[in-house]
Amino acid sequence: MSASGAVPDAVVSIADLEPLARATLSDLTWNYVAGGAADEISLDWNHAAWRDLRLAPRVLTDVSAIDTSLTLLGRDLAHPILVAPTAAHGQYHPGAEAATRRGAEAADALAIMSTLGSTAVADLGAAADGPWWYQLYVQADRAFTASLVESAVDAGAEALVLTVDTPLLGARDRDRRGGGHTVDGMQPPALLGAPPSVVMPADPRPYQRVYNPHLDPSLTWEALEWLVDLSPVPVLPKGVVRPDDAQRCVESGAGGVIVSNHGARNLDTVVPTAQALPGVVHAVDGVVPVIVDGGIRRGTDVAKALILGADAVLVGRPAIWGLTVAGAEGVQWVIETLWTELAMAMGLLGAPTVDDLSADLVWSH
């Protein structure tokens, strides 16, 4: 793990940062953060789907003042780039989630912290002053889950992000080739004392080996409705790709919907998020915000997501690369680089505000 410091001047894009992170981390840790499911087809698709969208800029528009700001769930934000929830930041940098939060705050970004993080929930709130949300894996023990929700809200979380696409893990072949991954066997501080959601037999049959003690495979719509009723802050299901599921999220009281395929880490050949996004946006019909993640690497990707109807985007792996290379300053650099590129894209598209990023800016002829 590296110590905190500035991102080297030679690094000018997110793509330049990735190999520096790779050189810093062990093979075991790198394969965990970089890998996708099975043959990693969807991992490639996530990037390619944004890349393959063609832009159709309008000209002779006054872009002397570019405004990337928005309001999301009542919170005024300087830009629509959020830090996605990812596990165990302590394996990338000694500052762990506290460094991630400080970097996000310095870049005026909202950060989402994970249940599987390296930091106790109560300590997350004291890490920085910027806005943050808490990502939740509902446990089979609902009383324990309720206490986790209470701790997160008491610590200052302004919303809960409920992961709904991971009742069990996918084929993490990179991890298995390397002999496992760094989170295997670890007990995240948030889950200390949690009864396992699945009790594995001493000698599990092959089909039983897919389960994980931290993940509840019996999760249903009832869990979302229970959490919405329980939580004093908005609940946003994360992992939605189908329009009918998105519509049911809204009907169940969700405060927003996050289009995600879990970074292509679970089910290979699942639809890339750029292709799933328009259908979800249509189904939600503006009732709640729609956020998207998966393969965002450039400001043009952020612009395309907003053009397709997203209110904001989540960035996961690039934030980890920044954290690995330069701690809080690295996270700040990643967000500010994407923010700058977004402003460039908006100006060159003839869209001075995020509301001007309309569907006609994607080439459809």
Image (cartoon, rainbow, N blue to C red):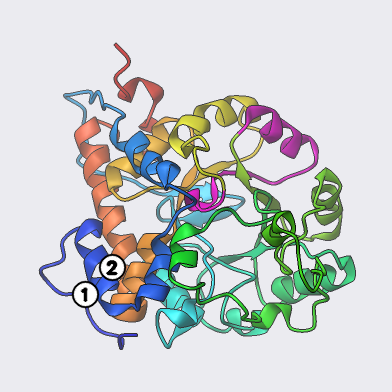
Q: Which mark is residue 7?
A: 1
- Disc 1 marks a residue whose amino acid type is Val
What is the quadrant of the C terminus in the image? top left
Residue 254 falls within the magenta-colored stretch: yes
Q: Which residue is mark 2?
A: 333
Whether residue 88 is visible, yes or no, is yes
Q: Earlier in the sequence, mark 2 or mark 1?
A: 1
Total labels: the figure holds 2
Residue at point 74%, 58% (across, down): 208
Q: Position of residue 327 (x, y in %)?
A: 35, 80
Query: Which of the 4 image quarters holds residue 212?
Result: bottom right
**Whether residue 327 is situated above or below residue 198 in the rendered picture:** below
**Whether residue 170 is situated above or below residue 53 in the rendered picture:** below
- The reply to whether the C-beta atoms of the residues labelled 2 and 1 are less than 8 Å apart is yes
User: Which one is in front, 250 or 176?
Assistant: 176
- Disc 2 marks a residue whose amino acid type is Trp
CA gap between label 2 and label 1 equals 7 Å
Give, as a single range, the part of the protein colored magenta: 242-266
Secondary structure beneath disc 1? loop
Residue at point 33%, 42% (across, down): 301
